[in-house]
Amino acid sequence: MISKRIEQIAFSSTVKVNQKARELRAQGVDILDLSAGEPDFNTPEYIKLAAKQAIDNDFTRYTAVAGLPEVRQVIADYLRTSYRIDYSIDEIIISNGVKHALYNLFMALLDPGDEVIIPAPYWVSYPEQVKLAGGIPVFVDTDESKDFLLTPENLESAITAGSKALVLCNPSNPTGTMYEEEQLRPLAEICVRHNIMIISDEIYSRLVYNGHHFISIAALSDRIKKYSVVLNGVSKTFAMTGWRIGFAAGPRDLIAAMGKVQSHNSSNSCTVSQMATKTALSQESKELSEMCLHFENRGKYLMERLAEMPGIECVRPMGGFSAFPKVRAWFGKQVDRNTIENSMQFVEFLIEKARVAVVPGDAFGKDGYIRISFATSMDVIERAMDRMAQALKELN
Ligand SMILES: Cc1ncc(COP(=O)(O)O)c(C=O)c1O
């Protein structure tokens, strides 16, 4: 009964890990969870207050499909001041999170068989959303020695007559690495030359540290901006994952087409959340800088601990709240007479022997690695690293 379209969509292997961790927890085993994809902080009080006021002021009805003009204006101002990109409000659409905006974008952009270039490791939903929209994901492997960043040569080699778009996750989930201007510009020039749309997922771009500065691809030139759609939101930046607000900014006709899709799959995003977003984006947030500092310190600590572990190598994250260490050196080792042969089996070993939950690299299209989230307290990270170090010692 299930459509072919849905049958080709994969369940993420994160589900498998979560299930295993949940089963053990139900048996009373204390599992330390480093698999989370959301900040462990609460939404700041001033944003919650804005939502309460919105309800009291009866902002409880449908809005324009693309979102309230006053909120889109605040988003336009935010993109101008924080990223130096100029958009008018008809070049902006507010959706139910970046995930929803991306879905609408692929539906609006792709014809059956269109190819979308996705550098691996990638965020889990890109390939499945491309397939849902009838497109073909074309994966380009990236190299740890180049911070997992797509190179111009790799991009050129993936381009065919069917290439329609390139997805860049900047800074990246899962690796935490980021493109600087000199790495972005040649990629953008190639896309413009080949008439390829650049889909720039910048959801982690305010959570940047270790002295790095983010630059949006759309800020590079007016010509590049015409070929770019920028996606961003409040989920990660303001610890608002449950409010479901993301937005896209790009060429007017494409944003209008996304609006057409959205008018049939959800209409406007939650009116109360839109008003909370208006406040979040229009005020300086000390909570945001505090959160960044926590992520920076936790990331630094995690890197120190991983560096002490034999057979583990990790590229230092520049933003976001995850790191992507290589664990391949442990493949071939025996655990209870079973050989570890891939990152999923390494993750199972960590759950069983260290009681630590992380995500296997193959969920992100790169076996031999694991994703460790540091969106959890320093205490949990410390204890998890102690346990992981001990389990590896016993495996040796
Ligand atoms: C790279 C990336 N893009 C998009 C999203 C979706 O975010 P939102 O909560 O805005 O839908 C996530 C969430 O995990 C993400 O990691």
Image: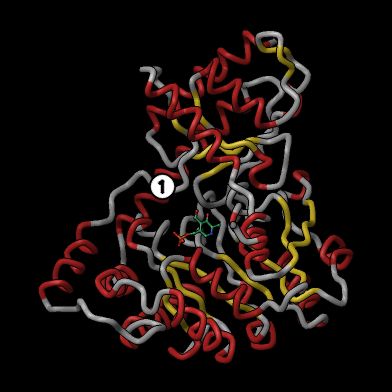
Q: Is residue 372 above or below residue 152?
A: above
Q: Is residue 258 above or below residue 210?
A: below
Left or right of 195 in this view: 16: left
Left or right of 394 in this view: 54: left
The answer, for residue 180, to whether it is visible in the render is: no
Q: Is residue 183 above or below residue 68?
A: above
Residue at the limit of the structure toward the left, as seen here: 56
User: Residue drawn 64% across and 44% down?
Assistant: 363
Left or right of 123 in this view: 207: left
Helix, strand or loop status at disc 1: helix
User: How is the model colour-coded?
Assistant: secondary structure
User: Residue drawn 56% across and 56% down?
Assistant: 212
User: Residue drawn 63% across and 50% down?
Assistant: 10
Q: Nearer the viewer, residue 175 or 220?
A: 175
Q: Is residue 238 above or below residue 363?
A: below
Label 1 Cα crowd, 10 Å radius (few <14 / some 14-19 / many 20+)? some
Exactly how many numbered labels are in the figure? 1
Residue 196 placement: quadrant: bottom right
Residue that label 1 marks: 293
| Residue 113 locus on image (x, y percent) | 77, 72
Q: Quadrant of the C terminus?
A: top right
Left or right of 304 in this view: 49: left
What's under tag 1, amino acid-wise?
Leu
Q: Nearer the viewer, residue 217 or 255?
A: 255
| Residue 134 locus on image (x, y percent) | 69, 70
User: Residue drawn 62% across and 8% down?
Assistant: 394
Residue 40 placement: quadrant: top left
| Residue 225 locus on image (x, y percent) | 63, 83
Q: Nearer the viewer, residue 391 or 259?
A: 259
Q: Quadrant of the N terminus?
A: bottom right
| Residue 255 locus on image (x, y percent) | 53, 85
